[in-house]
Image (cartoon, grey):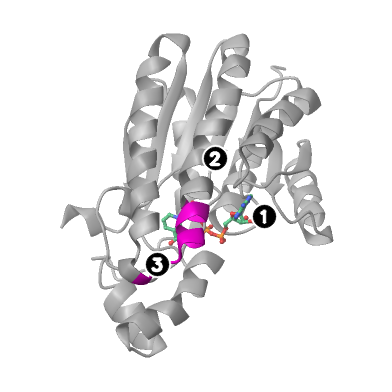
Amino acid sequence: MPSRKTAIVTGSTSGIGLAIAHALAADGCNVVVNSFSDTADDRAITDAIAKHHGVKTVYIKADMSKPAECRALIEKAAETFGSVDILVNNAGIQHVAPVEEFPIEKWDAIIAINLSSAFHTIAAAIPRMKQAGGGRIVNIASAHGLVASPFKSAYVSAKHGIMGLTKTVALELARDKITCNAICPGYVLTPLVEAQIPDQMKANMMDRDTVVREIMLEKQPTKEFVTVEQVAAAAVFLCSDAAAQINGTHISVDGGWTAQ
Ligand code: NAD
């Protein structure tokens, strides 16, 4: 039986990251679960993935706003499982405010967590992937990596940035059997999206239902939220042998948002 691949998913204790951790475990990978909180819940989630899918999992605390911790996450994962085959850069935060009022510390945190963390994890993972004879890097970008919306200057900038990083890394590693691609989800109803509803209500002077209908789902022609499982399925596909020639590009999972 071939040895299991090691998959690292950043920010994987909730939302899309958690669904990707489950889906890669279901596909037979040993999974590194990460967040910056290190709670009993984080460890229970990690154990539950192992138990449910019959693979090995480990929880590694690392704050993705800190370059040294991003790089240490990869090293600890390699020490634990002996290889790094799949890296999914998923950790992300959001803040909604007009650009002239956008708090500087929020700008810095969003650029650090949503963009720079991927630079650090990728840089640390590449030697391990080369050692393993190949690998897969999947960056969870956003429809906001392709188009903009008002009041999200930092998020849109970081997500456009990660699209550039994705293409550059793909070109640099094309001869090493390492692919680097992005997934661009539309609105997925996760804690990250729940948390921005009150800010959107304030910025747009709307009630909750109106924000969901006119700001969020207004963008998605299907008029439905994307599910975390749908994003996770795209990630598993990009990590499969069938996707070996898909490189430096993205899969949109946005109900048609960016077709407009
Ligand atoms: P979420 O809030 O449910 O999960 C975010 C995860 O990131 C959590 O596990 C959290 O612990 C982790 N995280 C946050 N800050 C961290 C830090 N400093 N260090 C380590 N981990 C940290 O959000 P989500 O909606 O599942 O978002 C996941 C990714 O998907 C993000 O990159 C987000 O931008 C992207 N995305 C989400 C949507 C959506 O509609 N929900 C749409 C497009 C893209």
Residue, x 38% and y 32% (percent of image)? 166
Q: In the displayed orientation, state which residue is furthest to the right.
A: 40
Circle 3 crowding by C-alpha within 10 Å: few under 14, some 14–19, many from 20: some
Mark 1 vs ligand 1: CB below 8 Å:
yes
Q: How far apart, in angstroms, are the residues tagged by discs 3 and 2?
A: 21 Å
Q: Quadrant of the C terminus?
A: bottom left
Magenta range is 101-110
Q: How far apart, in angstroms, are the residues tagged by discs 3 and 1?
A: 28 Å
What residue is disc 1 on? Answer: 13
Most common SS among magenta residues: helix
What residue is disc 2 on? Answer: 117
Q: Earlier in the sequence, mark 3 or mark 2?
A: 3
Badge 3 amino acid: Phe
Name the side, left or right, on which 168 lies relative to 41: left
Which image quarter: residue 75? top right
Where is residue 53? Give x, y as percent.
Answer: 72, 43
Residue, x 74% and y 56% (percent of image)? 37
Mark 3 vs ligand 1: CB below 8 Å:
no
